[in-house]
């Protein structure tokens, strides 16, 4: 959800911080830029350190920087925070793909990738339903905090329960 969370919260962020729609677009681009730049180095790290540590670290970085996004007051801060969070998200994307490759036999991998990738639109749906509601009830920042805390909890569970 964190990757696409800026979009449903954009009206609230724009209103409070007076960013332009172009700024919001660049926050989103920062995340994908990080995925792009970190693709090959992330793959090397996953091969070297394994899926458990890579998933844990990737999600933890993404979660912490999702929470840190709530502290921004200037565009540059938001861009840098989204970029660094995107590095964690990029590592997580590679590590989860690697996990499917090593955990499942060849004839089941496409099905498992289908399940994994179904999480992307599901996250978009949940973001669109939950985050604006939290923003209306409390603040746009609450949605980022909730996602970040959820990510930290899952990353701790990864550390203890995810197998190589």
Image (tube, rainbow, N blue to C red):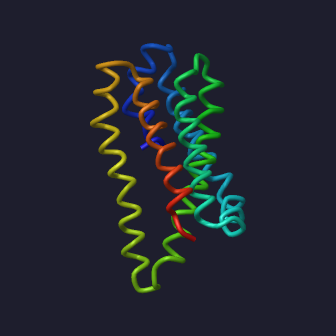
Residue 77 x %, y %: 64, 25
Give the side of residue 80 with respect to residue 143, left or right. right
Q: Residue at x 46, y 30 (%)?
A: 145
Q: Residue at x 54, y 77 (%)?
A: 102
Give the side of residue 59 with respect to residue 135, left or right. right
Give the side of residue 132 with respect to residue 99, left or right. left
Please identify the residue farthest to the front as the structure is shown: 160
Q: How many labels does the image show?
A: 0
Q: Nearer the viewer, residue 153 or 51?
A: 153
Residue 78, placed above or below residue 129 = above
Residue 130 x %, y %: 30, 35
Residue 11, placed above or below residue 98 = above
Q: Nearer the viewer, residue 82 or 96?
A: 96
Residue 164 x %, y %: 57, 71
Give the side of residue 131 with respect to residue 82, left or right. left
Q: Which residue is drawn at 52% across and 76% down?
A: 101
Q: Residue at x 63, y 47 (%)?
A: 87
Q: Which of 143 and 90 is in front in this view?
A: 143
Residue 151, placed above or below residue 53 = above
- The answer to which image quadrant residue 135 occupies is top left
Residue 50, placed above or below residue 121 = below
Q: Nearer the viewer, residue 8 or 93?
A: 93
Image quadrant holding the N terminus, namely top left
């Amino acid at each position: 959800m964190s990757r696409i969370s800026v979009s449903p919260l954009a009206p609230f962020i724009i209103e409070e911080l007076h960013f332009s729609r172009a700024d919001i677009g660049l926050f989103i681009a920062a995340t994908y830029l990080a995925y792009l730049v970190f693709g090959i180095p992330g793959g090397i790290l996953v091969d070297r350190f394994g899926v458990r540590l890579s998933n844990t670290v990737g999600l933890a970085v993404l979660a912490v920087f999702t929470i840190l996004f709530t502290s921004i007051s200037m565009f540059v801060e938001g861009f840098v925070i989204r970029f660094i969070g995107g590095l964690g998200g990029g590592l997580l994307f590679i590590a989860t793909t690697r996990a499917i490759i090593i955990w499942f036999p060849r004839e089941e991998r496409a099905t498992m990738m289908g399940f994994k990738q179904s999480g992307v639109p599901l996250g978009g749906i949940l973001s669109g339903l939950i985050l604006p509601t939290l923003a209306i009830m409390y603040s746009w920042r609450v949605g980022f905090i909730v996602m970040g805390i959820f990510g930290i909890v899952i990353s701790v569970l990864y550390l203890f329960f995810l197998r190589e």
